[in-house]
Image (cartoon, rainbow, N blue to C red):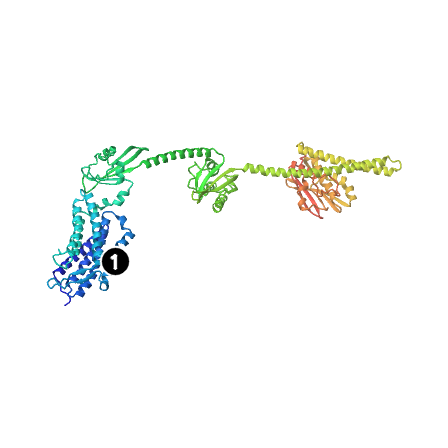
Amino acid sequence: MNYIFTTFSLLFLFTSLVSFAVAVIAWNRKRERGTTELAWLMLFAGLWSFFVIFETAATTIELKIFWSKVAYVGALTTPVLYLILVLRFVGKDKYLKKKYLVALWIVPIITFILTLTNEYHELVWTGYAPISPSTNLTQYYHGIAFWIGNVIYNYILLFITSAYLLTFIFERMSTFRTQGLYLLVGSLCPWIASVFYITAKNPVPGLDLVPQSMIFSGILFTIAIYRNRFLDLIPVAKETLFETLDEGIIVLDANNRVQDINDTARGFLGVESKNITGINIDCDYVKVKSFVSVIMSDQSESRLDVPGRLGVNSYLVLKKKFKDYPGSNLVIIRDITNEILKERQIKLSNENYQQLYNLFRMMSDNMQDMLWAKDLEKRYIFVNKSICNNFLFASDISEPIGKTDQYFFDREFAANHGNKQWHTFGATCSDSDQVVIETGEPARFEEEGYLRGSYFVMDVNKAPIFDSSGKMIGIVGSAREITQDKKNKEELVIAKKKAEESDTLKSSFLTNLSHEIRTPMNSITGFLELIQSKDINIDEHQTYIEQLKKSSGRILSTLNDIIEVSKIEAGQIQLDENNVNLNEILDYFISKYTSEAAERGLELIAEKGLDNNQAFVITDRNKLISILNNLIKNSIKYTYSGYIKIGYKHNEEVIDFYVEDTGIGIPKERQEVIFYRFVQADHSLTRPYEGSGIGLSIVKAYTELMGGGINLDSEPDKGSKFYFSLNYKPVIFPN
C-alpha cells in the first residue's frame, strides 16, 4: 500500500479545509480593501497543506519527494502573497506596481524550477533520512538553493512584512489596539514555525509547521474582519493618498488626541515635530493657535484667515464625526486662498465684462445701422434696437434671441395674408447666411424686398464668428437701409443718361439748325444778287421772288418751332379752348397742301367722321392745327408716291385723329426716340430732308397737354400712321 494516512495527515487536512473556508469568506467580501489578496493567500496556503497531506501519507521516498515538489507551489508563493496583502493593508500601493510584482516573483520561480529538477543538481535537497516507522515522516537534507531561495528570501519577505505591520500598529495603537494585537500575533506565527522547522527544536522531526502557521495567521485575519471590523477602518490608513492630499487631515479621538495627521495639516498648524500621534491637539507643538480654537469648537464648518508671509491665507475647516466612534472627529483643513482670489478675480472680471457689455449695448442700440449675431442654426444670439424696430418688428431686444428670421417673416405674412407684397423678405436673407456659413469668408450683399408693404433695400455685411480653436460658431452681420440712396443713384444714372442724350440731341439740333438757317440764307443771298442783275427778264424775276419767299418761310418756320419749344420747356403753354369745326380744319389742310402734294405726285385725302352739324367741338384750335400741320408736313416730306390721309373718327367719348401715308416708314428702333426734341428719323448730315427735328416733340407735348397722347404704327418702305385721341366735347347749340 503506497499511502498511510496518519494523525499528521488529518491535521493538514483540517488546516487545508480551514484555509479554503477563509479564502471563500474573504472572497465574498472582495469589495473591501485587502480581502482579494487575503483570499489568494489562504487559497495557496490551503493548497500547500493539501499537498502535504499526501507527502505525510506516502510510504516511499519517491512519492514523498514528488509531493514535496508539488507542495513547494504553496511554500514559495505564500510569503510573497503575505507581503502583498500587508502592503495593500497598510496603504503602500505604490509598491504594488507591475515592475515590483515581477521582481518579487523572480526568486520563487527560479527556486521552483530548481526544485522540480533537483535530481540533476541536488541544489535544493542533498539527501533524505529513512522514513520513520512511528511517524511515517522523513527528514530532508537541504542544499544551497533551499537556504537562499526558500529560507533567506522568505525570511526577508517576512521581515519586511512584519516591519510594515509593526510600524502600522504602533503608529495607530490607540485607534486599532485590538486589531493590532491580531495582526502582531498573526505576523509572528510564520517566524516561530519556520524556526522550529530548520533547527533541532522541531518536536516532530520532518514535520513542517509553517503551513499551519500561515493558516493560523489567516484565521486571525478572518476573526478581525468579522469581530473587530478590521477592514472597515482601512480607508483611514490609505497613507499614499493620505499624505499626498492638498487638504490637511487630522483624526481626533474623544479627548482631542491626535490619532493621525498628514504632512499638509502639519504645515498648516506649524508642527515641526513629525510625530504628534497620541498628543492633545492643544499642545506646544502646534504653533498656529488660531487653528486649535476652531478645531476644538462645536462648529462643523468654519472660515479662518491666517496672516502669512505673502499676505492673508484663508482656510476652510470642516469637522465630521465618526459614526461608530463617539466623540471622535475627522478634521479637514482646506486652503481656500486661491479660491478666494479667483472668486475676487471672477467678480472683478464679471464687473468689467458687465461694464463693457453695457457700453457695447448702449453704443449698438444708439446706432442707426442694424447689428446682429446668429449661431450656425441661424438663430439670433444678439440684436440691437435698430434691427428690432426696422426689420424684425420685435417687441424688444430679448424677443429675437433663439429665433430665426423666418419666425418674424411668417408672423408678418400671417398678419396680412391677402397681400403678397406685404412682406417678401426671408429667402434672400437665409441664402446669404448660408453663403457665409459654407464659404467661411466675409461677404457683402444687397438684399431687397417688401417690409410691411414698403419697398426696402439693405446694404448687408456678414462675416463668420470663430472660437479660440478656430472652429466656426456663428455669423455676425450689419446692415443699413439704402432704399432712397438706390433710388437717388438710379435717378442719377437716368439723369446722366438724359443729359448725355440731351447733349447729343443738342449737338444734332445745332447741326440741323445751322443747316436749316444757313441753307435758306444762302439761297436768299444768292437770289437777291440775281434780282439785282439787269440781265433777267420778268418771268425769272418772279421765280426768284418765289424762291426768296420760300426760303424766308423756311427760316420763319424754324424760328417759330424753336420759340414754341422754349415755351413748352418753360411751362408757358396754356390751353385756349373754343368752338372748333373739325371738318373746316380738314378742308383747310386739303386746300393748303393739295398743290404741294400734287407736285410730289401724291393724293391728299380727307376722311371726316362727323357731318358738319356734329363736327363742332370745344378744343384748342391753334394747338390742334399745329399738331395736324406738323404730321402732314412730315408725311409729305417722307412720302414719294401713293397717298396721304388725314381724318378723324368719333368713338363714344373721344375723337380719334390720324395722319396716314405710304412713305418710307420708320424703323422699329427709332419709333420711340423720334418724339424727342431735335431727333429725326434720319439724323445724318447727308440726310435729304429739311427740318430741325423738333416738330414731333411739339406734337407730343401738345397732345399730352390736351389730355391725350401720340402713337405710331410704321413699317419701313410701307408707310406710317400717326394717331392721337382727344376728349369729345361737342358744342351744344340752342334749338
Looking at the picture, tell me which residue is in the foreground, 604 or 433.
433
**Is 132 located above or below residue 585 in the figure?**
below
Q: Residue at x 27, y 37 (%)?
A: 267
Name the residue at 11% across, 60% down: 7
**Please, what is the three-letter code of the amino acid marked with disc 1?**
Ile
* Residue that sits furthest to the left in the current view: 134
Query: Which of 579/80 is in front?
Result: 80
State whether residue 62 is above or below residue 77: below
Residue 216 left/right relative to 658: left
Answer whether residue 299 is visible to the viewer in this image. Answer: yes
Left or right? Give the position of 313 relative to 463.
left
Q: How many marks?
A: 1
Q: Where's the C terminus, which quadrant? A: top right
Q: Nearer the viewer, residue 250 or 524?
A: 250
Q: Position of residue 297 (x, y in %)?
A: 22, 34
Q: Farthest residue toward the bottom?
A: 1
Residue 583 in view (yes/no): no
The crowd level at tag 1 (other Cα within 10 Å; few <14, some 14-19, many 20+) is some
The residue at which mark 1 appears reads as 109
Name the image quarter holding the N terminus.
Answer: bottom left
Can you give x and y, in whole percent of width and height, for residue 145 in the image?
22, 58
Q: Is residue 690 left or right of residue 279?
A: right
The x, y position of residue 611, in whole percent, is: 70, 40
Give the answer, above or below, for where 147 lies relative to 670: below
